[in-house]
Amino acid sequence: MSDPVPSSWHTSKWGNLGWAETVAKLVAIVAGLFAFALSFPGGGIGFGLNVRLAAFLVFAFLSVGAFMQLTIRLKQREIVSLVFAVVNLLGHLGLLYALLHPSLPPTIPLVFAAFWVLGQLIKLQFLRTTGFTEQGSDSAGMLKFAAVQTSLYVLFAVLVIF
């Protein structure tokens, strides 16, 4: 069973945890956009170490998730979530592009990862306390999905450090 499609655009009440998650993730997104801006003029493209390639591949997978989030938010027609999804996708794509440049200092992707993980930890608490679900998922499924995402961002951070 899927959630009903709203008949009009609307804004939801997210509460303090929802907004705290958004602010933490916006810091990460700004880091992604900053990394993108730093990659011009880009110089060479490459990975150097296999760990750097692994970090790129993990982040590429996470960026596909950011694209999927955009499509879900379009269907839900929730204004704040949709705007966030667009900015989120741009931040992910910006950092993904910047990761192609070996001259990118690891600090910026690490800042992205750290604030994204912080946002995810806040999201996990939000999901636990509110029981929020979407797309026909149950609470346990939402928590598991968010936990897996969090783990992948932690993995990305670890790979970026090396």
Image (cartoon, helix red, strand yellow):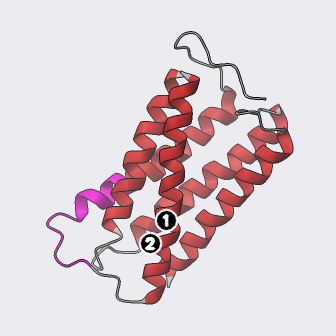
- Residue 121 percent coordinates (x, y): 70, 52
Residue under circle 1?
59
Write down the region rendered in magenta.
31-45
Q: Residue at x 65, y 34 (%)?
A: 18
In the rendered image, the vertical position of residue 3 relative to residue 110, given as above or below: above
Side (left or right) of 29 relative to 101: right
Say which mark, if any, is on residue 21.
none
- Residue 62 percent coordinates (x, y): 53, 59
- Magenta stretch containing residue 68, yes or no? no
- Residue 14 percent coordinates (x, y): 66, 26
In the rendered image, the vertical position of residue 151 relative to residue 92, given as above or below: below
Side (left or right) of 108 relative to 120: left
Side (left or right) of 107 relative to 162: left
Mark 2: give few (<14), some (14-19) or many (20+) Cα within 10 Å.
Answer: many
Mark 1: give few (<14), some (14-19) or many (20+) Cα within 10 Å.
Answer: many
Quadrant in the picture for residue 129: top right
Side (left or right) of 111 relative to 118: left
Q: Looking at the picture, which amino acid does disc 1 mark?
A: Phe
Label count reads 2
Q: Residue at x 61, y 49 (%)?
A: 119
- Residue 74 percent coordinates (x, y): 50, 28
Between 124 and 16, the one lying in front of the other is 124
Q: Residue at x 77, y 32 (%)?
A: 132
Residue under circle 2?
56
Q: Residue at x 73, y 52 (%)?
A: 145
Helix, strand or loop at label 1? It is helix
Between 8 and 149, the one lying in front of the other is 8
In the rendered image, the vertical position of residue 81 relative to residue 119, given as above or below: above
Helix, strand or loop at label 2? It is helix
Residue farthest toward the top in the current orientation of the protein? 7
